[in-house]
Image: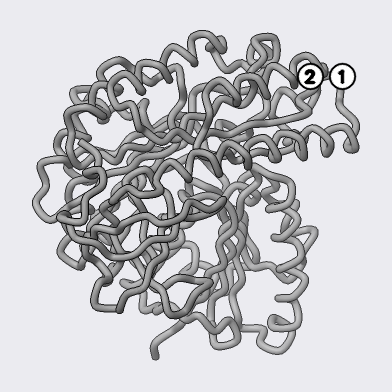
């Protein structure tokens, strides 16, 4: 009899990718995915502990699942991902109805784990760092992707140990996939309709094939030669690993989108040092200038943290000044929160929540001004848009993105999904652009490159 599973995902794009892989992993043992949680024989929660709010959502969901388990004792419930890796058996103690906890290295052992539990082995915890990237027994099972844009993890873990971050502790050290495995996955996705791929990794530009012969620039070049692929993106980049060779790729690889996410975290050198970021603001700025020398209109987004332990008002003002100088197209900004066992959780000089909130409000207000200004630069220009879907907010409009990753909404039909369409941008708004279909003869600027 066919069995069904439901999975809820919290956190980053890498978690989204992992959750998508679960269908592929569980297919050989007879599980198919359902969106209706009450129909499931197996419920999985893929968690994130990078931000405190994501962790709180996990415990809230677990509380709602308890009645389902009480009504159906044969239902299996498992918690995986970063919270699972961090909390381990404490999760089983806190939610006694849980059947198993599987850490970040155990995702691909799910068939064996579920098999053991189904035979009555009792609740279990699997949090050893024993990760294997490409498992041939499930790599052969390729459920239809049918997505215009696809996420593909190329490496996992991190060696940097930024003092605010738990990734090295819950994901382990850096481990890269083989070039052949990455290309094979993307080629399969292209066959099912994928036109754009985003390469994922905690520190994606430190990718190095297991044999050490191929780096990130080589991978980008190989992807640029794939027929049927229109666009290449990647995230997230560590500034210290943004090499001159990688910067040069933005000028010569026509499929590489003119956008980079380059986390700054702080504009203060003293804060950057305590964060163990391994660069100064001047070094970071020099790389931004190199990017814009190669591709003047490149879109740059970033991550910023306010209220890091010991951050003074002067430090914060230096971050605001850095934003004014660089003029990011967008920023993900957060209040610092202790994430044990990251080193900063033991630092003195903690900032009051009210002060962190004030700084975050001021930072986001400044970024909104800059983002609106940057979006208005597109007005009157023609941009090539990869049409992805109907607009989430405007049911009679279509939605896609520029090469620089700006969302564009315009009038159109479902027949445009998956195609590249020239759109004349009429208005730049804070969170998106608005335009209308146009032909090249309508004038305006050509797309990137």
What residue is rendered at 67% in x and 49% in y? 88
Is residue 156 something that shows in the picture?
A: yes
What residue is rendered at 48% in x and 9% in y? 283
Q: Are marks 2 and 1 in contact (CB under 8 Å)?
A: yes
Please give left or right for residue 152 compared with residue 446 in the image.
Answer: right
Please give left or right for residue 292 compared with residue 329 in the image.
Answer: left
Which residue is identified by label 2? 311
Q: Is residue 16 above or below residue 121?
A: above
What residue is rendered at 19% in x and 60% in y? 439
Across and down, in percent, residue 403 comes to 32, 46
What residue is rendered at 48% in x and 51% in y? 428
Please give left or right for residue 197 compared with residue 41 in the image.
Answer: left
Question: Depth check: 227 or 143 in front?
Answer: 227
Instruction: Estimate the spatial distance between the alpha carbons at disc 2 and disc 1, rounded to whole Å.
Output: 8 Å
Is residue 18 something that shows in the picture?
A: no
The N terminus: image quadrant: bottom left
Which numbered disc, 2 or 1, marks the residue that appears first in the sequence? 2
Coloration mode: one colour
Q: Is residue 54 above or below residue 41?
A: above
- Please state which of the two labelled residues, at mark 2 or mark 1, is closer to the viewer: 2
Across and down, in percent, residue 17 comes to 42, 55
Helix, strand or loop status at disc 1: loop
Question: Depth check: 285 or 426 in front?
Answer: 426
Helix, strand or loop status at disc 2: loop
Which residue is identified by label 1? 349
Question: Depth check: 10 or 441 in front?
Answer: 441
Across and down, in percent, residue 84 comes to 63, 51
The C terminus: image quadrant: top left
């Amino acid at each position: 009899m066919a069995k069904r599973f439901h999975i809820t995902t919290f956190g980053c794009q890498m978690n989204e990718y992992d959750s998508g892989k679960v269908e592929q992993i569980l297919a050989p043992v007879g599980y198919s995915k359902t969106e209706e949680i009450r129909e499931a024989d197996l419920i999985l929660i893929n968690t994130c502990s990078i931000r405190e709010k994501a962790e709180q959502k996990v415990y809230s969901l677990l509380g709602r699942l308890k009645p389902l388990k009480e009504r159906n004792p044969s239902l299996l419930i498992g918690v995986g991902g970063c919270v699972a890796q961090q909390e381990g058996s404490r999760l089983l103690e806190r939610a006694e109805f849980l059947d198993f906890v599987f850490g970040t290295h155990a995702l691909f052992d799910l068939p064996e784990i579920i098999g053991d539990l189904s035979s009555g082995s009792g609740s279990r915890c699997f949090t050893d760092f024993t990760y294997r990237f490409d498992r041939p027994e499930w790599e052969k099972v390729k459920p239809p992707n049918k997505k215009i844009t696809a996420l593909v993890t190329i490496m996992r873990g991190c060696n940097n140990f930024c003092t605010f971050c738990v990734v090295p502790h819950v994901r382990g050290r850096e481990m890269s996939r083989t070039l052949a495995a990455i290309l094979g996955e993307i080629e399969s996705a292209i066959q099912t309709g994928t036109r754009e791929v985003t390469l994922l990794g905690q520190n994606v530009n430190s990718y190095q094939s297991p044999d050490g012969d191929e780096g990130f620039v080589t991978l980008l070049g190989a992807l640029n030669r794939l027929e049927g692929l229109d666009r290449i993106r990647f995230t997230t980049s560590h500034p210290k690993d943004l090499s001159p060779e990688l910067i040069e790729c933005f000028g010569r690889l026509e499929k590489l989108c003119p956008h980079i996410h380059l986390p700054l975290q702080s504009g203060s050198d003293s804060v950057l040092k305590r964060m163990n970021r391994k660069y100064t603001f001047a070094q970071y700025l020099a790389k931004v200038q190199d990017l814009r020398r190669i591709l003047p209109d490149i879109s740059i987004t970033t991550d910023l943290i306010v209220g890091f332990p010991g951050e003074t008002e002067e430090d914060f003002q230096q971050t605001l000044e850095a934003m004014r100088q660089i003029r990011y197209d967008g920023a993900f900004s957060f209040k610092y929160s202790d994430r044990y066992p990251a080193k900063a959780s033991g630092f003195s000089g903690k900032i009051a929540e009210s002060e962190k909130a004030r700084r975050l409000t001021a930072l986001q207000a400044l970024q909104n001004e800059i983002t609106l200004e940057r979006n208005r630069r597109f007005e009157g220009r023609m941009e090539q848009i990869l049409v992805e879907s109907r607009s989430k907010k405007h049911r009679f409009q279509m939605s896609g993105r520029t090469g620089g990753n700006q969302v564009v909404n315009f009038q159109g039909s479902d027949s445009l999904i998956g195609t590249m369409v020239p759109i004349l941008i009429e208005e730049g708004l804070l969170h998106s652009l608005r335009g209308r279909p146009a032909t090249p003869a309508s004038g305006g600027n050509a797309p990137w490159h």
